Image (cartoon, rainbow, N blue to C red):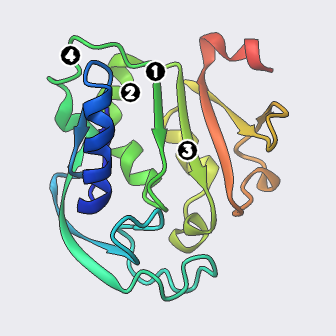
Amino acid sequence: VSFEPLPEAYKELQKIELEFKDRLDIHNIAIGVENSKSNLFYGNQKSEKASLIPNLEKLSFVGSSNKNKILVEVKKLDYFEDYFKDKKIDFIKIDTEGFEYEVLKGAQKILNLHKPKFIQIEFNWHQLIRNHNIYDLSKLVNFYDVFRILPHENKLIHVDPSRPENNIYHLSNYVFIREDISNNYK
């Protein structure tokens, strides 16, 4: 199941969905902390840097590229509780350009009900600007251990989210692994 708010990027996903009808279900919305409408800021029509966060020009890799905006529908993941009722959720990947905290906050029912094995997030300078850290995110998913994904397929490294050195704001990926299986990865 994939959520994509940017219309042209969504159209690209529709092409992929045709090829994998039985395996892919896409929705043309953003995921957040509440059901609402919000501006999505983007550079080009298929921008991977599109974000619900305004004023990202401070980030060198965004700069002035997100000068366009479009009003999009935002739903919290918990809105889809009935949709996921008869499904098993093992893995959630969140790459929302700084909106990861809001996605997790709006997914509390789903997380507690399904207890996915893995939740992967991108963690970078967006969180610095937003005053979010791995510790805050880990409190939203308190039945998980936190691992940093090391580059070049090296391995996972278990981290203590309360340690300052583990809250580095630079293009990192983390995976929260459910505590009952996390020892397999330590």
Marked residue nearer the N-terminal end (2 or 4):
4
Q: Residue 121 carries which label?
A: 3
Judged from the image, the secondary structure of the residue bearing numbered disc 2 is: helix
Residue at position x 64%, y 81% from top?
A: 60
Q: Are marks 4 and 1 in contact (CB under 8 Å)?
A: no
- Residue closer to the observer: 36 or 132: 36
Q: In which quarter of the image is residue 109?
A: top left
Between marks 3 and 2, how big is the CA–CA gap? 14 Å
Amino acid type, callout 1:
Pro
Residue 45's x, y, as percent? Answer: 33, 70
Q: Are marks 3 and 2 in contact (CB under 8 Å)?
A: no
Q: Residue 116 carries which label?
A: 1
Residue at position x 50%, y 33% from top?
A: 141
Residue at position x 78%, y 56% from top?
A: 164
Between marks 2 and 1, how big is the CA–CA gap? 7 Å
Residue marked by disc 4? 85
Judged from the image, the secondary structure of the residue bearing numbered disc 1 is: loop
Q: In which quarter of the image is residue 170?
A: bottom right
Amino acid type, callout 2:
Leu
Marked residue nearer the N-terminal end (4 or 1):
4
Does residue 78 appear to the left or right of 162 in the view shown? left
Between marks 3 and 4, how big is the CA–CA gap? 24 Å
Residue 62's x, y, as percent? Answer: 54, 78
Q: Do the residues labelled 2 and 1 touch (CB within 8 Å)?
A: yes
Residue marked by disc 2? 111
Amino acid type, callout 3:
Ile
Amino acid type, callout 4:
Lys
- The quadrant the C terminus occupies is top right
Q: Which mark is residue 181?
A: none
